[in-house]
């Protein structure tokens, strides 16, 4: 299934300020797509709309053939938890939970954390932090915390992963580790990954780059 935007417009404020102008894009199943552009170009706004976290002011954005604007709050909640994984610039780990407990949070919402515990441990091992499973976020480095956040996004084996500046708070070495993990999981799981980044090198590592200029899709990539 794909993600599609048809004439998507997003405005904020009063009087309204237009952030996105008539966006028309298709992201195919299994693709790894980067959304890039200068600060203020509308990258995160577009990501939030296609990931169901926000709605367009006009136009239609569909995911998996469904229009989130037509879902009930319960349907949308279940759709997100079952089919979508999120990774943000700031990892948003709960400080009172261990690394493994943070990874298992999405499964816990469905009472399935016990069934997913072995997979959670294997993800941490694969990401080189298996020995940190029982450590709390405050005991981990920034790069380690972000790897925990990625493992958390993968625990339900989602069809879609949305990443908003996942390397933005990391140094170049840890940023590369995070990118390599996302690319690896994209190929292994065939999950669709959409990533916002302002870093040209990382944007170019995706299968395809969508470049925004002043809220419009542009062919410019420089």
Image (spheres, grey):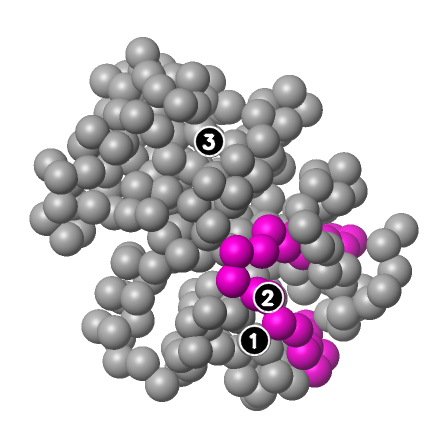
Is residue 53 visible in the rendered image? The answer is yes
Disc 3 packing (10 Å; few <14; some 14–19; many ≥20)? many
Mark 2 falls on what kind of element? strand
Q: Nearer the viewer, mark 3 or mark 2?
A: 2
Count of labels in the image: 3
Task: Check residue 85 for magenta coloring.
Answer: no
Task: Tell which circle, 2 or 1, labels the residue nearer the N-terminal end.
Answer: 1
Q: Is 14 rendered above or below residue 114?
A: below
Q: Tag 3, which secondary structure? A: helix
Q: Earlier in the sequence, mark 3 or mark 2?
A: 2
Q: Is residue 14 left or right of residue 222?
A: left
Q: Write the residue at 42% across / 72% down.
A: 64
Q: Residues in magenta?
A: 18-39
- Structural distance between the alpha carbons of marks 3 and 1: 29 Å
Image coordinates for residue 133, horizontal then vertical, percent: 27, 20
Residue in the foreground of this view, choosing between 132 and 161? 161
Going from N to C along the chain, the mark reached first, 3 or 1, is 1
Q: Which quadrant of the figure has residue 108?
A: top left
- Check residue 56 in the rendering and tell me which mark sits there, or answer none: none
**Residue 30 within the segment the image draws in magenta:** yes
* Residue depicted at 13% across the width and 39% down the height: 115
Residue 14 in sight:
no
Mark 1, residue position: 4
Circle 1 packing at 10 Å, graded few (<14), some (14-19), many (20+), is: many
- Horizontally, residue 43 falls left or right of residue 64, namely right
Q: Disc 3 and disc 2: Cα gap in Å?
A: 25 Å
Mark 2 and mark 1 residues within 8 Å of each other at the beta carbon: yes
Q: Which residue is mark 3?
A: 146
Residue assigned mark 2: 27
- Alpha carbons under labels 2 and 1: distance apart: 6 Å
> Is 109 above or below relative to 41?
above
């Amino acid at each position: 299934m794909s993600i599609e935007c048809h004439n998507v417009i997003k405005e904020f404020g009063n009087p309204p300020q237009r952030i996105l102008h008539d966006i028309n894009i298709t992201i195919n199943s299994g693709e790894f797509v980067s959304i890039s552009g200068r600060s203020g170009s509308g990258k995160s706004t577009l990501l939030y709309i296609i990931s169901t976290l926000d709605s367009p002011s006009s136009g239609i954005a569909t995911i998996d053939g469904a229009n989130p604007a037509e879902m009930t709050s319960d349907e949308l909640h279940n759709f997100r938890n079952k089919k979508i994984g999120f990774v943000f610039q700031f990892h948003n780990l709960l400080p009172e939970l261990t690394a493994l407990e943070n990874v298992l949070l999405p499964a816990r919402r469905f009472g399935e954390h016990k069934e997913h515990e072995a997979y959670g441990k294997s993800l941490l091992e694969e990401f080189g932090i298996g020995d940190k499973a029982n450590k709390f976020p405050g005991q981990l480095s920034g790069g380690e915390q972000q790897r925990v956040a990625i493992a958390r996004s993968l625990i339900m084996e989602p069809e879609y992963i949305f990443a908003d500046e996942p390397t933005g708070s990391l140094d170049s070495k840890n940023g590369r580790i995070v990118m390599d993990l996302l690319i690896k999981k994209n190929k292994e799981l065939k999950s669709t990954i959409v990533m916002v980044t302002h870093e040209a090198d990382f944007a170019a590592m995706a299968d395809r780059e969508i470049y925004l200029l002043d809220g419009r899709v542009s062919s410019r990539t420089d």
